Image: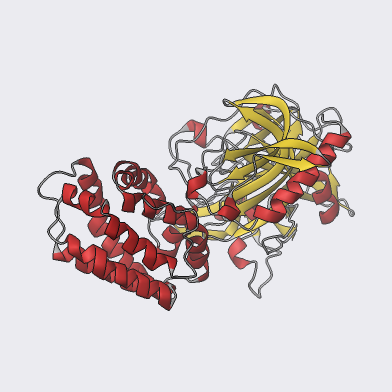
């Protein structure tokens, strides 16, 4: 545990970093923790900052560059930057039967009677038709059983598990929504219904909102139909010797970093208590590397360690929105989607993590937001984009300029794509161009000097069409600049093959033509771009 003076300084330093950088889309979390070096934890205290993607300073605007250290009361502390990717809630609609991998579906499809913590629970109002024609639901894990002032027993889990988030802003109330255990199908939906939503804490909106809770309760129809044991006896029952501290609720894309909301404040807010008296502990202070454990419906038992106690984190929705959470507990490799709501306790060996999930890197905010805007699977194309950047654009002055401009203006593009949604007509047009050129570009990168790859009039026409589509979400000055670049720089590439394009993009006049045109546009950031000597 940190001494109080150091903890106070780091908390102050965290606040200074958050005040200055929290609005940037590349920042995902800020907390008080320890420094990592070479992938290993050290005992050096630090302000820890999670970012979607680590970038070299030359790819950042001046106001995006994080300090290496921060001074508080005359004492300097390290600012440790960790690449996390995007953070999301760990309840998903992807596993009605959870596939065939037993590591991914432990208790998702298992009915437990009497009800047990650690088993799946589902909000029936989230029912929707899957791509394969089946039925999907949004769900997670029962955390524990709690009782209200009248002694009525409820199941506890996350709000994003038990509440249909799409209905939060509708006129109809969500209280009373039916809960199922486990994931039902059309034949057994009535038989699996076990209770109804009886309370939850709504999320606060706004970039500086301080959500500290993700919790909901469902009143059980069968007031005696529950037990304190866990499925498979994977954890001993909760007790004064096995104290709970929070609920697992969010993680990054590969689940290497996970977050927990504190339990005690949520119980007080909901007006309930654990059915097992004196079985909770309100973590306070900095308890680095304290072992913790949980049982989740998807991955079963895991035991990891506390790595932060005062994290602030942005948790993203699929539509690009996010909620800001504060005063979180952070850990690593504790769970997957479907484990949301799992009760986290002090205990375990601290070295039984879940396996990392082999998922596409979601570490590009621009690809996330623009992909959502046009309903395109751009996150799967990050490796291709990196290949284009490193093996094509990096060879030329103009290509390097375009790469820098991409990163310098990523914040603007991300915000614009969220605030200015595309119409169905635009989505259809974007999909047509994507389907036409995605594999073509991948093939061209694999064999760029193949004589078949030459700039045609069709390529130029489609580029003009894309510019016209993008213009619907740009200022007039931005549109005029892009059309000017198209006429003076892009159209002369007609008939060029790979090496001729490289020569064209290395031409000083071409480079300065693009830079000079963009510099005159006040909404485009060119600061930090260095021209050729």
Above-or-below relation of 406 to 181: below
Above-or-below relation of 469 to 360: below
Where residue 217 appears, as percent x and y from the top left, is: 74, 53
Where residue 262 appears, as percent x and y from the top left, is: 77, 44
Q: Of 107 and 438, which appears nearest the observer? A: 438
The quarter of the picture where residue 118 lies is top right
- Give me the residue at 61% from left, 61% from top: 165
Where residue 222 appears, as percent x and y from the top left, is: 74, 49
- Give me the residue at 24% from left, 44% from top: 445
Horizontal relation, residue 497 to residue 428: left or right: left
Q: Of 215 and 155, which appears nearest the observer? A: 215
Above-or-below relation of 456 to 479: above
Quarter of the figure with the N terminus = top right
Check the image and name the residue furthest to the left. 451
Where residue 444 appears, as percent x and y from the top left, is: 20, 47
Q: Of 264 and 58, which appears nearest the observer? A: 58
Image label count: 0
Q: Of 277 and 294, which appears nearest the observer? A: 294
The quarter of the picture where residue 512 lies is bottom left
Check the image and name the residue furthest to the bottom. 476
Its colouring scheme is secondary structure
Check the image and name the residue furthest to the front. 533
Horizontal relation, residue 502 to residue 166: left or right: left
Mark yes or no: residue 147 visible.
no
Mark yes or no: residue 294 visible.
yes
The quarter of the picture where residue 329 lies is top right
Horizontal relation, residue 5 to residue 174: left or right: right
């Amino acid at each position: 545990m940190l001494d109080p003076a150091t903890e106070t300084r780091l908390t102050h330093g965290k606040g200074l970093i958050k005040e200055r950088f929290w609005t940037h889309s590349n920042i995902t979390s800020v907390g008080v923790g320890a420094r990592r070096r070479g992938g290993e934890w050290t005992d050096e205290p630090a302000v820890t900052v999670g970012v979607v993607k680590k970038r070299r300073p030359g790819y950042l605007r001046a106001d995006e560059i994080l300090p290496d250290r921060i001074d508080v009361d005359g004492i300097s502390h390290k600012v440790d930057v960790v690449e996390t990717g995007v953070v999301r809630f760990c309840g998903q609609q992807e596993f009605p039967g959870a596939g065939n991998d037993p590591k991914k579906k432990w208790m998702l499809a298992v009915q437990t009677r009497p009800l047990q913590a650690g088993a799946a629970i589902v909000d029936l109002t989230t029912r929707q038709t899957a791509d394969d024609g089946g039925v999907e639901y949004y769900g997670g894990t029962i955390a524990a059983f709690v009782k209200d002032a009248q002694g009525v027993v409820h199941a506890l889990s996350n709000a994003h598990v038990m509440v249909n988030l799409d209905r939060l802003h509708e006129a109809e109330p969500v209280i009373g929504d039916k809960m199922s255990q486990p994931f039902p199908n059309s034949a057994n939906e009535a038989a699996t219904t076990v209770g109804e939503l009886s309370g939850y804490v709504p999320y606060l909106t706004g970039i500086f909102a301080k959500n500290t809770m993700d919790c909901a309760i469902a009143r059980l129809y069968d007031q005696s139909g529950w037990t304190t044991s866990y499925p498979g006896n994977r954890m001993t029952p909760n007790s004064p010797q096995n104290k709970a501290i929070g609920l697992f609720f969010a993680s990054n894309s590969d689940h290497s970093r996970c977050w927990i909301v504190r339990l005690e404040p949520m119980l007080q807010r909901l007006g309930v208590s654990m059915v097992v008296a004196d079985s909770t502990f309100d973590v306070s202070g900095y308890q680095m590397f304290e072992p913790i454990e949980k049982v989740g419906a998807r991955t079963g038992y895991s035991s990891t360690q506390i790595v932060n106690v005062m994290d602030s984190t942005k948790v993203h929705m699929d539509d690009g929105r996010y909620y800001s959470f504060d005063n979180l507990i952070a850990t690593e490799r504790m769970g997957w989607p479907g484990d949301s709501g799992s009760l986290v306790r002090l205990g375990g060996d601290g070295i039984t993590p879940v396996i990392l999930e082999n998922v596409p890197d979601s570490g590009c905010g621009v690809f996330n937001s623009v992909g959502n805007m046009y309903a395109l699977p751009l996150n799967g194309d990050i490796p291709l984009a990196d290949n284009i950047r490193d093996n094509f654009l990096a060879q030329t002055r103009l290509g390097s300029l375009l790469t820098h401009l991409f990163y310098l203006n990523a914040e603007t593009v991300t915000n614009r794509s969220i605030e200015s949604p595309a119409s169905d007509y635009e989505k259809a047009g974007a999909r047509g161009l994507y389907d036409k050129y995605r594999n073509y570009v991948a093939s061209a990168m694999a064999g760029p000097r193949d004589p078949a790859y030459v700039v045609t009039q069709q390529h130029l026409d489609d580029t003009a069409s894309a510019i016209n589509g993008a213009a619907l979400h740009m200022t007039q000055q931005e549109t005029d600049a892009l059309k000017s670049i198209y006429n003076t720089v892009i159209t002369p590439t007609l008939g060029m093959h790979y090496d001729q394009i490289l020569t064209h993009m290395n031409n000083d006049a071409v480079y300065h033509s693009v830079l000079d045109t963009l510099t005159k546009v006040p909404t485009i950031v060119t600061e930090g771009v260095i021209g050729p000597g």
